[in-house]
Image (cartoon, rainbow, N blue to C red):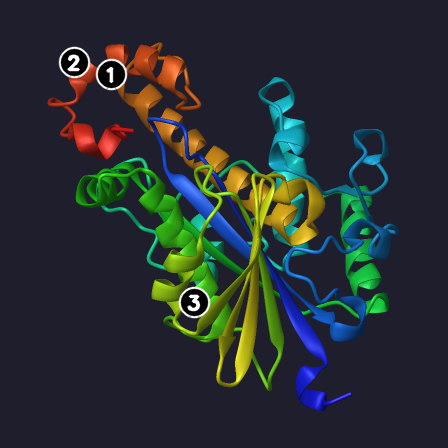
């Protein structure tokens, strides 16, 4: 085998917080290097991640006490069991080499931003804020050690991560400029794809001819992405399947090729997407913790919110009359769509 073609980077891209009126949209990309001999040649082909890593991971909640639960964040986290859910989401950060317990959370993430994450207009987004630590007990550490051992034994890795947070003011500006909420999502996915092939700012993933296959959760229900991919990345875009369930493409460059699949259930079928989903959800939940703490310090008795439309309206009715007094512009608080 040509030494320049021994590896493929499998990139999973997902988001949390696309629907709420309060709080940021968070997007994440997780890239894991895989020996080419293990990887399918078809864009979006489902490879047996959970089989490869069955000694340390599971999608079954009943086994989560013995193995790391890795799945779509909606399956891992529930508001009814929030502390347990946060711990499971937090495990994804540890699995990817991020230690949020080392320092405060935002400082720990500094090397991983795809673009600057600090929103100076938001008084509740304090880069120095620390959160109560969820105990990293011996049993949990044992599970994380098993993950690292399992990865090495399967010949997988290293792992790279990139994160993007879009705060309400920037979100609103992007919608105003484009006339479409979906643009906020596609802008982020575009940055991750450019990062993956070394076409954007900062170092890319491709080294010595490594291949790249990216899997993305479907964007706004679209089925056709060829013109957008061509304008974003250049290269020659060859479409494959374009259907409600999956849209696949190959983008050919002079010295490299990128395969991309947009799928309706990507986070259920591809572990890198599931991990990206978990990271994005964890960061949004922690941001909303800081958001709620700030408002509760200003207005006695205000109940916390997750930011989704119905409850966001309830929250706005309470805090709205105080915005001017607290010097919080509406477009800093409220996402228009």
Q: Secondary structure at mark 2?
A: helix
Q: Seen in the image, is 116 located left or right of residue 72?
A: left
Q: Earlier in the sequence, mark 2 or mark 3?
A: 3
Q: Which residue is mark 1?
A: 319
> 323 or 230, which lies in front?
230
Query: In the rendering, at what x and y percent does residue 154 appear?
Result: 84, 66
Picture quarter with the N terminus: bottom right
Relative to 306, residue 117 above or below: below
Tell me where residue 317 sits by quadrant. Answer: top left
Picture residue at 39% right of the left edge, 53% below the top: 188
Q: What residue appears at the point 45 percent right and 60 percent down from the top-left corner?
A: 192
Which residue is label 2 attached to?
Answer: 321
Q: Residue at x 88, y 51 (%)?
A: 55
Instruction: Report if the CB atoms under discs 1 and 3 are less than 8 Å apart.
Output: no
Check the image and name the residue furthest to the left: 324
Taking depth in this image into account, of 253 and 196 the one nearest to the observer is 253
Q: Establish if 16 lies above or below 195.
A: above
Q: Observer-nearest residue: 17 or 39?
A: 39
Task: Give the label, 1 or 3, closer to the camera.
Answer: 3
Residue found at the very far bottom of the displayed protein: 2
Earlier residue among tags 1 and 3: 3
Residue at mark 2 to residue at mark 3: CA–CA distance: 43 Å
**Residue at mark 3:** 194
């Amino acid at each position: 085998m040509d030494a320049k073609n021994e590896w493929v980077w499998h990139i999973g891209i997902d988001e949390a917080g696309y629907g709420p009126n309060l709080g940021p949209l968070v997007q994440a990309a997780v890239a894991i290097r895989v020996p080419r001999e293990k990887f399918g040649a078809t864009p979006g082909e489902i490879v047996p991640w959970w089989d490869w890593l069955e000694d340390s991971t599971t999608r079954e909640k009943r086994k989560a006490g013995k193995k790391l639960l890795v799945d779509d964040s909606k399956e891992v986290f529930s508001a009814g069991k929030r502390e347990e859910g946060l711990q499971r989401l937090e495990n994804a950060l540890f699995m990817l080499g991020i230690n949020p317990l080392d320092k405060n959370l935002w400082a720990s993430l500094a090397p991983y931003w795809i673009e600057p994450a600090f929103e100076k207009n938001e008084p509740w987004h304090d880069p120095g804020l620390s959160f109560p630590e969820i105990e990293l007990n011996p049993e949990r550490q044992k599970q994380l050690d098993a993950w690292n051992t399992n990865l090495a034994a399967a010949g997988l890795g290293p792992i790279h991560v990139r994160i993007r947070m879009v705060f309400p003011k920037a979100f609103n500006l992007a919608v105003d400029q484009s006339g479409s909420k979906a643009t906020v999502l596609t802008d982020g996915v575009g940055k991750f794809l450019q990062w993956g092939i070394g076409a954007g700012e900062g170092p890319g993933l491709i080294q010595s001819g490594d291949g790249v296959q990216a899997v993305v959760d479907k964007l706004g229900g679209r089925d056709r992405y060829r013109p957008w991919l061509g304008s974003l990345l250049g290269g020659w875009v060859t479409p494959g399947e374009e259907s409600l369930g999956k849209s696949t493409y190959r983008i050919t460059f002079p010295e490299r090729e990128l395969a991309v699949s947009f799928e309706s259930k990507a986070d259920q079928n591809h572990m890198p997407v599931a991990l990206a989903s978990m990271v994005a959800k964890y960061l949004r939940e922690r941001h909303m913790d800081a958001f709620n703490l700030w408002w509760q310090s200003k207005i006695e008795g205000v109940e916390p919110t997750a930011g989704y439309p119905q409850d966001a309206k309830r929250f706005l009715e309470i805090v709205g009359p105080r915005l001017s007094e607290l010097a919080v512009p509406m477009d800093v608080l409220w996402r228009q769509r």
